[in-house]
Structure formats: structure tokens, C-alpha cells
Amino acid sequence: MKIGPYHIPGRAWLAPMAGVTDLPFRRLCHEFGAAVTPSEMLTSDTRLYHTRKSQLRRVHEAEPAPRVVQLAGADPAQVATAARLNVDEGAQIIDINMGCPAKKVCDRLCGSALLGDAALVARILEATVRAVNVPVTVKIRTGLTPATRNAVQIAQLAERCGIAAIAVHGRTRAQRFEGEAEFATIADVVRAVRIPVIANGDIRDAQRAREVLAQTGAAAIMIGRGAQGSPWIFRDVNAFLLQGEIAAPLLRVQMTEIILRHLESLYEFYGETAGVRIARKHLGWYCQLQSHASDLRPMLMAAESSVSQMEVARREFGRWAHEGARAA
């Protein structure tokens, strides 16, 4: 598939997730085969770009193409201005967030709240497409509520506005992340537009990825929570899609090496205090690999320095890897 001038080499994308898909995690997922790795959601209010959080979300050093920056906002001129600034800083694709269900986002009439105002959606998309010379994409949900699903209409509108691709999460705003994602609406979107459609929601393994592609006819799938604590999922999905076979599982010693390398990259990127704090959420997900996670997790969460956190992780995950090798 192509998005503007960019040939996308695979069908498994990383979903943008605030607080998760920072540069260290994006690099790791790309290493394992994620074809597109969008940034965390970034505000379109450029007055806030001096904050530490916004500055870090705009770092793209040594990031593989295409570099995708996702913007959230409800003011067309503001979103367009932010898009131009980010393109000047190296963004190669601008993605507009119209899918986030978080209350603090929707209360500002951003994210999935925009799906209730098609006219405003059109103004935002048109202004952004006019403002930049790179492809503009959009991520949406199926609608505000199950009774008011309008993803097909929004997708057709987006196509008319010049949007290059659209990702659809198979839940409504009202559902947040509850219940199961449904893909019939995404299949309807695929049939209704000519631009690439990316299917998102509840894709946690390679077999499910292939099922969703077959069910929807989408050009690609987007993996979010399924990559948390399992960045190698893209390796597994790509192997299954290309070869029809489940890839041999990584050895525990390989997983341990990846986890420790991820920690080091977080400390380097964020610094001591923030690095330790942000590493905790990733360690919590990695702990799910282990049967004795109930004992390990509290130790990792209690560590107050990178040295002590790394020491616990190296010792406990190393022991886990040794037990796996001995059992084999």
C-alpha cells in the first residue's frame, strides 16, 4: 500500500497510544516489524509546545520513515498551524485524532467527540490538507454510540477532503474500551471508500490479525494494547500473514534482553526520575509474562532509582530466563 509518496512495507501498524508510544517504544516496535509507528497524541495548541511533555513527543531522532505525528484539536486553524510546524520539524505524515474516547479529550470536543459534528470534521480536515504538503490521515471510531454509528459517512467525507488513509477502531465513543470490538462497520467503510482503511481493536495475536483482515477487507491492521508488554507481536503477525505459519516463540533469554534494553532506552530518553516512573507501566505489562508476577511487580514498582529498578529486573527476569532454559 502507498500513503502519498510512501510505500508501506507491511500490514501491521502500531496504534498511537498516549503515554505508551513514545520514541523508545516506537523504535522497538519498528525493530520487530511494525510498518508504521505513529507518535503519541500531541495537542494542536502550539502555545503548550514549550512543556517537557510536548517537547519529548516531538522528538524523531533516528526514527524510520514515514514519521507520523498525531494531532488532537477542535479548531481548524489551530490544527492546521500545528500540522505545518510539525512538518517543518520532520513529520512526514500528519494524523488527526478523532477516535480518543478519554473524557478529558472529549470534554474539549476533541477526539471521538468530533464524530458528532460532521461539518466541523470537514473544516478541520480541509484546513489541515491545505496547510501541508505531506499526506494527512485520520483515526476514528465507528460513531458516538451503537445507535448512531456514522463511520461510513465520516470516511466518505474524509475522502472528499483529501485524506490519504483512515484508521477505524471497532468501538463507539460510548463503549470506550469495554465489550468487544465489532468489524462489520469497518467492512462497510472499506466498501464505501477508495482510500486505504486500517482496522483497529482487540487484535492481540497473529491469528486474530488475519481474521480481521479477511473479515473487513482492510489494507492493514493496527495493534494497540496487544503490543503492550509484547512489542514482538509484529514479528509474529508478519510471519503469519506472509508465510501462514506461527513463528517460533522467542526464548525467554531473548525476551529478557529486549526488556532490559527497553529499560535502558527509557532512562536515556526521559532521564532518571521520569524514566523510572514511565518504566513502571511497561514493567507491569512485562510482568504478565511471568507466573510469579504478583511477587515481582511490587518490587519493580517500589524501586526509586534506575539502578535499583534495573537490578531487580535483571535479577528476576534473568532467573525467569534461566528457568526456561533449564526446562527446555
Image: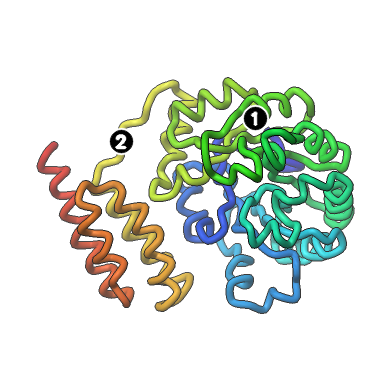
What's the amino acid at mark 1? Ala
Q: Please, what secondary structure does the residue beneath circle 1 have?
A: loop
Q: Residue at x 48, y 48 (%)?
A: 29
Task: Answer left or right for 315 relative to 11.
Answer: left
Q: CA distance from mark 2 to mark 1?
A: 26 Å
Point out the image quarter for the C terminus.
top left
Task: Count numbered badges in the picture.
Answer: 2
Q: Residue at x 62, y 72 (%)?
A: 55
Can residue 93 be seen by looking at this rendering? no
Q: Nearer the viewer, residue 142 or 296?
A: 142
Per the rendering, the mark at residue 309 is none
Pointer 2 residue = 249
Pointer 1 residue = 219
Point out the image quarter for the N terminus.
top right
Residue 42, compared with residue 28, is above or below; it is below
Answer whether labels 2 and 1 touch (C-beta < 8 Å): no
Task: Answer left or right for 53 relative to 191.
Answer: left
Can residue 155 be seen by looking at this rendering? yes
Quarter of the image holding residue 73? Answer: bottom right
Q: Nearer the viewer, residue 289 or 112?
A: 112
Q: Residue at x 57, y 39 (%)?
A: 222
